[in-house]
Image (cartoon, rainbow, N blue to C red):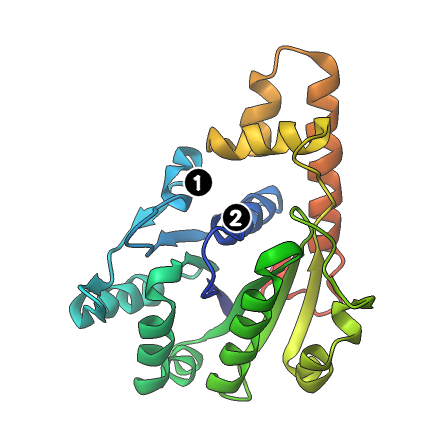
Amino acid sequence: MSTVHMVLQGKGGVGKSMLAAMLAQFKISKGQTPLCIDTDPVNATFAGYDSLDVQTLDVMQGDKINSRSFDMLIELISKTTEDTIIDNGASSFIPMSSYLMANDIPALLQEMGHQLFVHTVITGGQAMPDTLGGFDALVRQFPDECQFVVWLNPYWGKVENEGLSFEEMKVYKNYSDRVIKLITLPELKPDETYGQDFSNMLKARRTFEEAIDAEEHIVPRQRLKIIQRKIFSELDNDPAKVLTYGA
């Protein structure tokens, strides 16, 4: 059974496209050729990674889902035996989630031989309450058989609330049985070398491989390799092998 990895979070600018790109690169490093699709109608950041061969598909018509475009998304998934990675924008978060449920898409994908996993981001800093709320809304809306991969992004600060880690928070404890994987991204402060190198790579829409090859200086190359190893190690540490090999 191949897997469909859909990135959903109602808060913009928290790293959704980044995690889609990381997951695509990781799967490619394992010899896979994932189908990558960007449905963000406002900022098609994922599609900016030329080497990932990302297809763009505008599924919105005004503030509603364009049913014909969405139908095309399902057709694209139906024609591949590879895993699929879909990046969705904040502006289409609510209509996309509602449309998925109204058309019973998780069950349809399962009938087609594809299992859906929803990826979402929790950040530290000011956006944390919004991202926690987005996670809560997603789990409430999606059926019990749909499982979640939660990415903890400490770029703007530790993912903590009143001294509690995410795993100690009530929202996680309420839904821990729905979370198949927690991925903790490395703490890369924007005003330090590691954070700057990583940020420059993302702004240039380069993969790790491209950024390392393009970097003229030895130490920045080494820092990018260290970041890549840390992120890929988090993805590789997957007892269910959902991220590595599919379900």
User: The C terminus lies in which quarter of the figure?
Assistant: bottom right
Residue at x 74% of width, y 54% of height: 158
User: In the drawing, what numbered circle is on residue 24?
Assistant: 2
The amino acid type found where label 2 is placed reads Ala
Position above or below: 30 against 197: below
Is 12 positioned to the left or the right of 223 in the image? left
Residue at x 40% of width, y 77% of height: 109
Is 21 positioned to the left or the right of 212 in the image? left
| Image coordinates for residue 244, horizontal then vertical, percent | 64, 57
Mark 2, secondary structure of its residue = helix
Residue 113 visible? yes
Residue nearer the viewer, 88 or 113: 88
Residue at x 45% of width, y 66% of height: 10
| Image coordinates for residue 17, horizontal then vertical, percent | 47, 49
Of the image marks 2 and 1, the number of the one nearer the N terminus: 2
User: In the drawing, what numbered circle is on residue 52?
Assistant: 1
Is 124 positioned to the left or the right of 1 in the image? right
Residue at x 29% of width, y 64% of height: 73
